[in-house]
Amino acid sequence: MSLKYIRKIKKKVLLQKKLKKNREWLFREENTLMNLFDTPQLTGDELKQIFSIWGPAGLTASLTNEFRIFKKISGFDPQFLPSSLYYPLIIKSLNPTSYSAFYENKAFFDLILKGLKRPRTIIKNVEGNSFNNEFLPISKHQVLQKILKEDKIFIKPISGSFGGRGVKSINIEEYSSNEIIKILDSYSKNYIIQEVIVQHEDTRIFNESSVNTLRVTSLFLNGKTTILFVLLMVGSPGNIADNSAGSLRVKISKDGSLDHKAFNKNLLKFEKSENGVPFKNKKITHYQKCINMVLDNHSRYFPMCGLLGWDLAINSKGEVVVIEVNTRVPGIRTGQICCGPLFGERTKEVIEYYKKHPPLL
């Protein structure tokens, strides 16, 4: 047995161990959801259809439980992308970590997305150093003075704020200078402070405490950009983030109209927001502006990342504001529940790309 062959086998074993570890939390999440629903078994024919599509991407029998969840809630479709392939493999092929990790840092969005409308940034803190919006260093005294000129500010970590972690909205007049300093000290480093956006009535009606955004998921591959799905993300009363645990996701159709049903993180269905506003017959007036912005700018600003989750707000003037762009692991499960299989007619194209560009785990 050659040394080269031994190394190949050893590498394969190590890869399988790493994949197993990466999937442990996914299996726990799947089991939680399966306990919430009486999920049906997959038939032999359904399994055959699934493996004909995803077998070439490495799907095994132990990775099919999520198809039972999809079948229960949305109906069977073999093109649904299971999380067990997406998180450890597919997304890392489409969005290599060496690029996506940098793009995920919110402190650099104003530089990366120059030319697109963004929330006005007041302060950036990177590794304990404070900067203004032009990335010029400023002192702690200058930081406080800039904050005191504002009526209300929005503060969040420059990374890792998924689910609204570390996100705060502060009415300046309610705090003394010392209290503001203590709040900043609690973050220590790596945060941004921005203006608070006044959102459009089309999204405000579902919850006033959060800026409810459109999640536009786009694919740029082989020179072509496609909108995969569009959701309205609605926060829960009292929460300032639209991606907190109690938030809802609603499909937006191509004419800007909302579906009659929404889903939360646990895939439970709702026909009204928590404040009692039904989703049926509601429409996002400036929807097409969001779509055009993404189609025009995915490849322009993010040519090295194939799959993006754009979080877009529509302000009171009807302007599209880019809140952030998710590059590392844009969420897909609820989006597929609301809108159907992620890649649709481009599924085989993505699988072929993945096979030619396996990720470095």
Image (cartoon, helix red, strand yellow):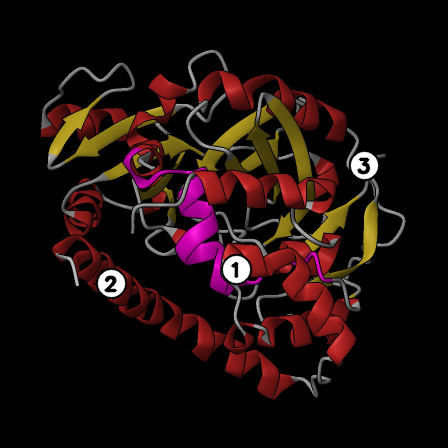
Quarter of the image with the N terminus is bottom left
Question: Which mark, residue 78?
Answer: none
Discs 1/3, front: 3
Measuring from the top left, give residue 246's x and y in whole percent.
Answer: 56, 66
Q: Where is residue 132 in the image (x, y as percent from the top left)?
A: 24, 20
The residue carrying mark 1 is 238
Distance from disc 2 to disc 1, alpha carbons, whole Å, reads 54 Å
Residue identifier under label 3: 256
Q: Which amino acid does label 3 sit on?
A: Gly
Magenta residue span = 78-98
Q: In percent of the image, x 18 and y 15: which residue is there? A: 136
Of mark 1 and mark 3, the one earlier in the sequence is 1
Left or right: residue 78 compared with residue 145: right
Please identify the dominant SS of the magenta region: helix
Nearer mark to the viewer, of 2 and 1: 2
Q: How many marks?
A: 3
Q: Residue at x 32, y 41 (%)?
A: 97
Determine the secondary structure under disc 3: loop
Residue 103 in magenta stretch: no
Pointer 2 or 3: first along the chain: 2
Q: Where is mark 2, residue-wise?
A: 9
- Where is residue 56, by image quadrant? bottom right
Q: What residue type is labelled 1?
A: Gly
Element carrying mark 2:
helix
The quarter of the picture where residue 272 lies is bottom right
Q: Nearer the viewer, residue 115 or 342?
A: 342
Mark 1 to mark 3 CA distance (whole Å)? 27 Å
Does 15 appear above or below 254? below
**Residue 292 x %, y %:** 68, 21
